[in-house]
Amino acid sequence: MQKRRIGLPSGGELEVEMTPDFLCYVRRQFNLTEEDVVTDDHIRMFVHGSVKCALDDVEHDPEWVVRRDL
């Protein structure tokens, strides 16, 4: 397993532990070959897109309601 610290545009860092399967998903998303280098930008964009997609799905699911009074 590989670990990377990736600088974020707004400051701070994203620390990612990457398995070979994770890198395969990133390569597939960006149409990279095994010889292509997976850059910090690829990983950052992949994580951002994955989280955004998951949150968008939750927002459209009536079973998931955010309760602000907890």
Image (cartoon, rainbow, N blue to C red):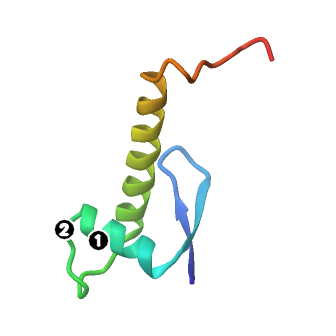
Tell me which residue sits at (60%, 18%) in the image. Answer: 65
Relative to 56, residue 30 above or below: below
Q: Quadrant of the N terminus?
A: bottom right
- Mark 1 is on which residue type? Arg
Q: Please give left or right for residue 20 compared with residue 64 in the image.
A: left
Kindly identify which residue carries mark 1: 27
36 sits to left or right of 2: left
Residue 3's disc number: none
Q: Is residue 22 above or below residue 63?
A: below
Which residue was labeled with disc 2? 31
Q: Amino acid at mark 2?
A: Asn
61 vs 13, nearest the viewer: 61
Quarter occupied by residue 53: top left
The residue at the far right in this view is 70
| Residue at 71% over, 14% down | 68
Give the residue displayed 23% in from the left and 88% down from the top.
35
- Secondary structure under badge 2? loop
What x and y, as percent, mark residue 66?
A: 63, 19
Query: In this picture, is 49 found above or below 21?
Result: above
Residue 37 percent across, percent down from the top left: 30, 80
Seen as rendered, the residue at the extreme front is: 63
Q: CA distance from mark 1 to mark 2?
A: 6 Å
Query: 67 or 42, which is in the foreground?
Result: 67
Pick out the residue farthest to the bottom.
Answer: 35
Residue 42 rendering spot, x and y as whole percentages: 35, 63
Q: Is residue 42 above or below residue 68?
A: below
Q: Disc 1 on helix, strand or loop? A: helix
Q: Quick one: label 2, few (<14), some, or many (20+) residues within 10 Å?
A: few
Closer to the camera in the image, 44 or 19? 19
Q: Residue at x 47, y 44 (%)?
A: 51
Quarter of the figure that contains the C terminus: top right
Q: Do residues under tags 1 and 2 come within 8 Å of each other at their CB atoms?
A: yes
